Image (cartoon, rainbow, N blue to C red):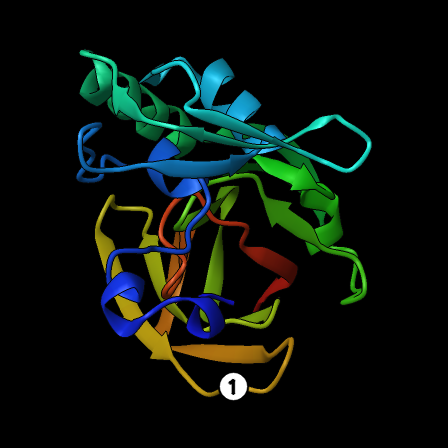
Amino acid sequence: MSIFFLTPAQRRRIELITIDGYLYQRRDLDRQRDLFIMTATEYDRAQQSGKFIIMPPEQIIPYPDGRPGFYVARLEYVANIDEILATERAERAALVEEPLAVGGQELIVAHSRFDIGGITDLFDGDPNTLARGLEANPLVIELRFPNPQPISGIELALGTMEFDLTVTVTTPDGETQAFRQTYRGLPPDPTITFDLPQPLLVTNLRLDIFQQGAGEPAHVHVREVRWR
């Protein structure tokens, strides 16, 4: 919209971004220079985050019914923002462990937290069910086999995105190998096949799915996971 109402010089001074762009990573923020126009929802989110010192609003623009619609305010980070962000990054990286029966065998699956679906949705043979990562990017799925499994490749059904896939395998003797592939220009909701250089006997299989261009937090969608 700014292209219709502002001069080129004015447009260079404006950035269209939600408050989320400042909530999860530290950005250049100067309360003397920067003036935020936030919806009431964004303003509440900024207040409740505990990450900002918010100056009294310079203006509150109401909706036609009189409810607060937009807050015009200046803000700065709290003094311990780096500590807060580091704690959040550590929490996003922590994995949840669950037992799971797949193909007649019991194994342990460790994974990033989900906000939609669950780990069983990734192994039910139905690509219409899915699990969506809550925040982590990369999303991690780690399979721990009580009995070593011969594995030659991985198949993944995913949500639409460009991504990097890192496959890390651990063999019974404790040796770890990592393999990485970048995927671009895939069709919507792709299914990809990742072949190992050679079949390996595996006790631990870890998948790191990094969505390009999404930053963190991100919602990485996974529909199916299969190994062969």
Q: Amino acid at mark 1?
A: Leu
Q: Position of residue 225 (x, y in %)?
A: 61, 61
Residue 78: percent from left, percent from top: 25, 14
Q: Is residue 105 visible?
A: no
Residue 29 higher or lower than 131, as above or below: above
Residue 167 falls left or right of residue 97: left
Q: Position of residue 12 (x, y in %)?
A: 24, 64
Q: Which residue sits at x=46%, y=67%?
A: 5
Residue at point 29%, 69% (across, down): 180
Residue at the location (76% across, 67% down)? Answer: 127
Tell me if 124 is positioned left or right of 40 in this view: right
Q: For numbered disc 1, what is the local secondary structure? A: loop
Q: Examine the image and state in which quarter residue 119 appears.
A: top right
Q: What residue sits right under mark 1 in the picture?
A: 186
Picture quadrant of residue 129: bottom right
The reply to whether residue 167 is in sight is yes
Q: Nearer the viewer, residue 25 or 191?
A: 25
Q: Nearer the viewer, residue 109 or 41?
A: 41
Choose between 197 and 46: the one closer to the eye: 46
Q: Residue at x 62, y 30 (%)?
A: 41
The image shows residue 194, relative to residue 176, as above or below, that is below
Instruction: Name the side, left or right, on which 110 lies relative to 199.
Output: right
Mark 1 Cα-neighbour bin, 10 Å: few <14, some 14–19, many ≥20: few
In the picture, the quarter occupied by the C terminus is bottom right
Count the labels in the image.
1
**Horizontal arrangement in the rendering, residue 8 relative to residue 21 (left or right):** left
Coordinates of residue 39 in the picture (x, y in percent): 58, 36
